[in-house]
Each structure stands twice: as structure tokens, then as C-alpha cells.
Image: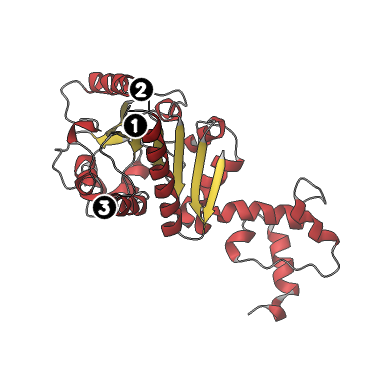
Amino acid sequence: MRVIIEPTNEQGSAWAAAHIARRINEHAKSTDRPFVLGLPTGSTPLGTYRKLIEMCKAGQVSFANVVTFNMDEYVGIPEDHPESYHTFMRRHFFDHVDVPAANIHILDGNAPDLQKECEEYERKIVAAGGIDLFLGGVGEDGHLAFNEPFSSLNSRTRVKTLTYDTLVVNSRFFDNDVNKVPKQAMSVGVATIMDSHEVIIQAFGHKKARALKHGVEGCYSHEWTISALQVHPAGIIVADEAAVGELKARALQQCVEGPYSHVCTISAMQVHPHGIVVCDEPATAELKVGTYRYFKDIEKDNLI
């Protein structure tokens, strides 16, 4: 698994867009088969969509021979509802690039047989040759698509009842009224995503720091479905500095409280007679309370 750390959300989004465009262009040179692209919704991918639109209009990439499969859709709201994912994708991406309408696939949350719709979606992905690259975001609780904590890591496209935490988070799109958020959604499974030839998961902002920590440093576990990326042969996490705060916190903890060891080379600072570590408050999250207070006390006259 690769972890790409850019200073800002904007730069991380640009990195992901450039990578996707490069993959599409490389694919077009080697085969006439359409490039199959998995796509997310939500606020995380918006910067990447804006950059891809810009690149498409500049002639740097074309979606004319790209087939898309979206991650999810709410159950029971019309396709033209302002917060349906059909509407979201048209508004933020499809209406601005040259992807043929016939190449776009989004789950139908109003299908008469939802289970059949899910099974057919999986068959369509297989018939398309599998997903070449799946772009996604990660939730604060580590979920991918609507695969919330304790979802099976072998799950496939299915109907999901959403947790209350998810309803609260998504209520920002529904007038901040949790009662307006659909209680169910259709979602690709963790295994559906992991079957993709390449997966890019974006994590931006300090609220995603804990999820990123578990995804990178934690155990492979259904408690944090982002951890599934650990076993993907071509998994990439793209994060901004704010999202890696807890990763740096562990490094700081190892440096200050851990053993002097080549496992954590920053621990070499322990034997330097004039070593100084300068950090912000989030980076101290893993330190023991006593350690934190000790250094705050002895360095109080040196702090700005």
C-alpha cells in the first residue's frame, strides 16, 4: 500500500486526478477496451472531479471510452432529488465531461427488486471486465462507500441500513435534519472495491486522522473497513497533512517514550545532546499524560 501525503486537500485532489488521467491515457494506448472507473460521491472527491473536468476541457484526458460504476445510492428517493447520487454525479462531474450516458452506471434505489438490482450490478461490473481503478473516500469511522464498521470484508453489492452516526454526518446535505436522510442505501461491498485492479482512497482533514491511522497502522479488521486496503496489491491512500496527524503522533510517541531502535529511526534523537523536537498539539496525542505535562512544564519559558 502506498500513502501519498500532500500539504493540502487541493494538492491531494490534483495528485489523484493526474494519476487517474494518466491511467486512462495509458490504457487507451494499449487497448480499445473501455477503461472502467469506479467513482464516489460526498465532499471528498469534489476537488478531484473539478481537476478532471479542467483536464478534460483542456484536452489532457477524454472519458469518451470510459465506463463508470458508482459506489452507492440512497434507497427510496427519486433520481432527480437534489441529494440523490444520480443528481450529485451529474452536477459535479458527468455533465461537464465527455463520458457517454450509456457508459454511466449508478444503482437504482427505486428498483422494484433491490436485491436483484444489486446482483445485476455485480454482473455488469464483471461483464465490463472488472474495475480498472476505483476512487473512493473514507468516512470518519473508517467506512468505504456505505460499508460501515463491522461490514464483512467479503461483502458484495447489497442494501444497507445506515447507522445513526452516518445519518447524522449526512444530514448536512438534508437541511441538517437527520429525519430527512434516507435510512437505507445500496452500496458496493468491500470485496467489490478490492477486486478492482487499483484502488485510490482519499482522506482529507483532521476528522479523517483516526480512520487513516487505523487504515495504515492498525489491524486488518472489519471494524475499520479501510484496513482492507492493506492487502490490496495496488492500493493507494492520498491524504493531506491534516489527515496524517495521528500517524505523526505515533512517530512522536516512539521517539519520546519508545526504545532507542532502528525500527523507528527518529528515536536516534534520544542520544543527541542537543536534540529538539518541535510539534503541534495534535502530534502529542499518543504521549502519556505525564510525559506531555513534563515537557510542557520544563519548556514553558521557551514556548511562543
Amino acid marked by disc 1? Val
| Image location (x, y in percent) of residue 196 | 43, 29
Quarter-wise, where is residue 134 in the image? Answer: top left
Mark 2 or mark 1: which comes first in sequence? 1
Q: Amino acid at mark 2?
A: Gly
Q: Are marks 2 and 1 in contact (CB under 8 Å)?
A: yes
Residue shown at 24% from the left, 18% from the top: 116
The structure's colour scheme is: secondary structure
In the rendered structure, which disc, 2 or 3, sits on the residue that comes first in sequence?
Answer: 3
For this rendering, which residue is in front, 103 or 135? Answer: 103
The structure residue drawn at horizontal position 47% and vertical position 60%, both measured from the top left corner, is 8
Q: Are marks 3 and 1 in contact (CB under 8 Å)?
A: no
The Cα atoms of the two marked residues, 2 and 3, are separated by 28 Å
Q: Which mark is residue 36?
A: 1
Q: Looking at the picture, tell me which residue is in the foreground, 298 or 128.
A: 128
Disc 2 marks which residue? 129
Which one is nearer the viewer's eye here, 152 or 18?
18
Query: Would you place residue 281 above or below residue 95 in this image?
Result: below
Left or right: where 222 falls relative to 14 = right
Q: Secondary structure at mark 3?
A: helix
Residue at mark 3: 57
